Amino acid sequence: MEPGFNYRHLHYFWVVAQEGGVSRAAARLGVAVQTVSAQLQALERDLGVALLRPAGRGLVLTEAGEAARTLADRIFALGAALPEQVRVAAGSRAVRLAVGVSDGLAKLVVQRLLAPVLAEPGLRLLCSEGPQDRLLAELAQHRLDLVLADRPAPPNPNLRLYGHALGRSAVAWYGPPALAEAARSGFPQSLGTLPVLLPSAHSALRPALEQWFERHGLHPQVAGEFDDGALMKAFGATGLGLFPGPVVVEPAMLARYAVQRVGDCDGVEEQFWAIGTERKVQHPLVRRLLDAAPGG
């Protein structure tokens, strides 16, 4: 029996529900506002109920719209999984895992977090790095299976995202041998007279570092700010400045960048999160990552 609606109409409604307005949905879909409005009207006509109602300058879901949106989430999640499932059914050994990596998260930490799945036979790992807000938009469109970040997803009534804590790490200060030796004398006050490198204001770690400086009465000489933690460490290794790093990956960091530990950044921790679109995770590799986390 043919369904009583058009799946294209449903997709347009689903995007409008996520974006909270026809104009934003049209911009995301790359079509005219009139096209989106026509698709919505056609879907409501086919279903015989109103799915959206005006609220201020935007739209909100009716009770029927909430039910339709919940089902649409499942439908398009299944649609995104269809290619992989078909390949598996056809005997392909390829297992795809698309991961978004927030640019504020240390890359050595990312390697550690993904370690439980890296030995999967036929794994095809797709990593995309960028600002968390862009990655979350791609996650909501089911272009990614999960996002690894240094903070949970911010509240958004138009996006149903779920954060899963993967762990945390103490933070310490590091630098190349000569700079580290100079910094150990009178640490932590020495950080007020030596150059330091910091993550940019977009990082979840930055406010905690600024509070740490304030607690110790320090006014650091900031020689550089970086969105990318790996880039910050690379420049720190050249002697540009001392930099903070997660203790959990210290052995790998010391070996890769030939730096030394100066001292603890007491009271400062870095957190690691996996963000997904499902409360009950279905992707087997994502489930394995969560189970491997402390308390998973």
Image: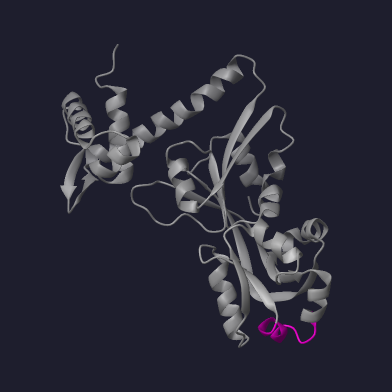
Residue for point 82% across, 62% down: 258
Number of labels in the image equals 0
Q: Which colour scheme is used?
A: one colour
Name the image quarter holding residue 206: bottom right
Name the image quarter holding residue 265: bottom right
Q: Where is residue 121 shown, x and y percent of the image?
A: 72, 28
Q: Where is residue 104 shown, x and y percent of the image?
A: 58, 58
Magenta residue span: 184-193
Q: Where is residue 187 shown, x and y percent of the image?
A: 74, 83
Residue at the farthest top position: 1
Reply above or below: 216 against 66. below
> Which residue is nearer to you in this view: 12 or 256?
256
Q: In this view, does 234 lie to the left or right of 64?
A: right
Residue for point 79% across, 56% down: 256
Judge whether residue 185 is colored magenta.
yes
Q: In this view, does 223 lie to the left or right of 153?
A: right
Name the image quarter holding residue 6: top left
Question: Which quadrant would the N terminus be assigned to in this image?
Answer: top left
> Which residue is nearer to you in this view: 96 or 236?
236
Judge whether residue 152 is colored magenta.
no
Q: Is residue 173 left or right of residue 276?
A: right
Reply above or below: 23 against 252. above
Residue for point 38% across, 47% down: 159
Reply above or below: 92 against 176. above
